[in-house]
Structures are given as structure tokens and as C-alpha cells.
Image (spheres, grey):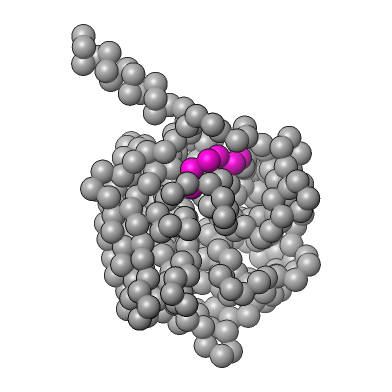
Amino acid sequence: MAWLGAATALLTMLGTAPAGADSAWQKVGGDARSGVSGLAYEGRTGAGTDVLVVHDNKRTGQQRLSRITHREGADAVSPLIWAGAEPSDLEAIEAIPGMPGEYVALASRGIVYRLKVTGSTATVVDYAPLPAIGAGDDFESFALVARNGKLAALWADRGAGPDRPATLYAAPLTFADWGQPLFGAVTRRAYRAPYPVDGGTRHISDISVTGSGRVLVSSAADAGDDGPFDSAVSDAGRVSVSAAGQVRVTLAARPTVLGTFPGYKIEAVECLPGSAEAVLGTDDENLGGFIRTLSLCGA
């Protein structure tokens, strides 16, 4: 009975977001074509936060990118024009540190697109494959880290259930004069989500890195286009970049679950610069997409 009581208490704790939540979920899309597959911080607009959101659409002419101005109780969604080679199944997007208006977006099969966003248009500067793609890799996450004047990228095969953990990749990143992303030596780490733990778990559905180098990941379970869904955000470890550009990732032996979110499939987590706040986004398939903010990114 003591064991049962402790287990019940643990499940109760895991079934909720952490204390001090900043907002409730707000709907930003009403169908499978308008969910949030990834998001990147763009800037502030008065009391709102502008983020760029990618959609995992695959057919020609479908929406690839939108801008959301997130405000308490009133989100505004504006589609952006995609100019250039049209991707299939975009899953992540990240602002390039030190390059205002420039971003890297990632498609599920491992193609990265360097973008320049001006007003309502996103122009493809160049694109390239990720290095060291493994057999069966399916990518949903991408993050950039700037330290000591150097830039590094983190991305992950999402994994699938107990037999396939996620593989977290990391490498130095530079850009050719003409804009092409160029990756250095790649390191790999296996990662298993502490929650959710069912057979369909995607161990890493997105990655964000705090100012102090903490690596936050979202994990998600998807039982089909109508759910049920489940997800969590966890503190997975740390990343550092040396003055020589070497990237070191140290994953926690026991990742800390920061919050769980039954009923939602989180595919985007973005720590806001200079803040403890994270913006979370979901792609709940036929149920659409939602975003919210939470205090997850403190030191």
C-alpha cells in the first residue's frame, strides 16, 4: 500500500505542468495542415512575442511557414511566402545567432534550408543535407549554439519506442560565402525519454539550449491522427563549445522531467533569449496546433 501511494503521488506530479505556468494553451491552427512542427523566436511586438512556425506539409503549394504573434488570450497567425526550393515535411526552425533575419529550417529526411526572412517573405539562400545520416533516421529537431565566437548545431533522429532511442547529433557549423551550411566533425549520443514511455514514443521531438548551455528536449507519443497524444519537456544534459570550435554534449544519466502534457503532442520548444520563458508548440494532427509559454529555461 505504501508503494501504491508513492506511485499515485508520482503520477499526479507527472500529470501536470510545473508550478508558475505563464499561460494556458492557445489554439493557433484548426487542422492537420496548420499544426506547429517547429518554431523560432523572431522578436517582440509590443506586449507580444513573434515566432516563426514551420508546418510539416508535403504537397506542392501548401503552407510551409507562418508568423505567430503570441499574446495572452489573442494569438495572431500570418502566413509567409516561401520563395525558393520547396521542402517536404519541415519539422524544425532556428534563428542563426548574430545574423538578424536569418534562419535554418530542417526537413524530416535531413535537408537543412538557410532562409532570409524579410517582411512576409522567406527566401531560400541555400540548402544542404545533414552529415552522418543514419539508417532510418527521421528528424524533428534542430538547435544552434553560439559560444566563444563559434557556432554549433544539435539535431536528433526522433527514435521510436523502447527499441529505438533517439540519436542526438552535434557538430560545428559554418556557412560558405554563397550561403551553404557546412558541418564539421559529428558526435552522437543515444537518448531515451523518461516520459512518455509507451511503444510509440518519439524520444526527441525538439531541442532548445538555454543561455547557460542546458539542453532541453521535448518528447511525444502519438497514437494516430486523432490522438490520444502525450508529451513532456525534460532537462537532458549540457552542451559546450570551446574556443577552438569543439562541441561537447554531456547527457544526464537520469534526465529531469520539467513538465508533462497529456493530451498534447509537443513538437516545438524554444527558450526565449535572456529569459526563463519557453514557448511550446504542438502538432496535434487533425486537432490542429496550440502554443503556450512556461518558465522552463532558468539556469
Label the magenta part by its dominant secondary structure.
Answer: strand
Q: Residue at point 41% right, 59% down?
A: 213
Residue 177: percent from left, percent from top? 56, 90
Task: Using the rendered image of the protein, determine whether residue 130 is visible from the camera's viewpoint.
Answer: no
Residue 134: percent from left, percent from top? 31, 68
Extreme bottom residue here? 177
Extreme top residue here? 1
Residue 164: percent from left, percent from top? 27, 51
Q: Quadrant of residue 74?
A: top right
Residue toward you, 190 or 283: 190
Q: Is residue 173 above or below residue 20?
A: below
Task: Using the rendered image of the protein, determine whether residue 212 is visible from the camera's viewpoint.
Answer: yes
Q: How many discs appear?
A: 0
Q: Which residues are magenta?
A: 292-297
- Residue 17 within the magenta-colored segment of the rendering: no
Residue toward you, 161 or 78: 78
Residue 217: percent from left, percent from top? 42, 50
Q: Is residue 167 above or below residue 36?
A: below
Q: Residue at point 47% right, 70% down?
A: 146
- Residue 295 within the magenta-colored segment of the rendering: yes
Which quadrant is home to the N terminus?
top left
**Left-right relation of 24 to 211:** right
Residue toward you, 131 or 215: 215
Q: Is residue 27 above or below residue 85?
A: above
**Left-right relation of 174 to 53:** left
Q: Residue at point 26% right, 43% down?
A: 254
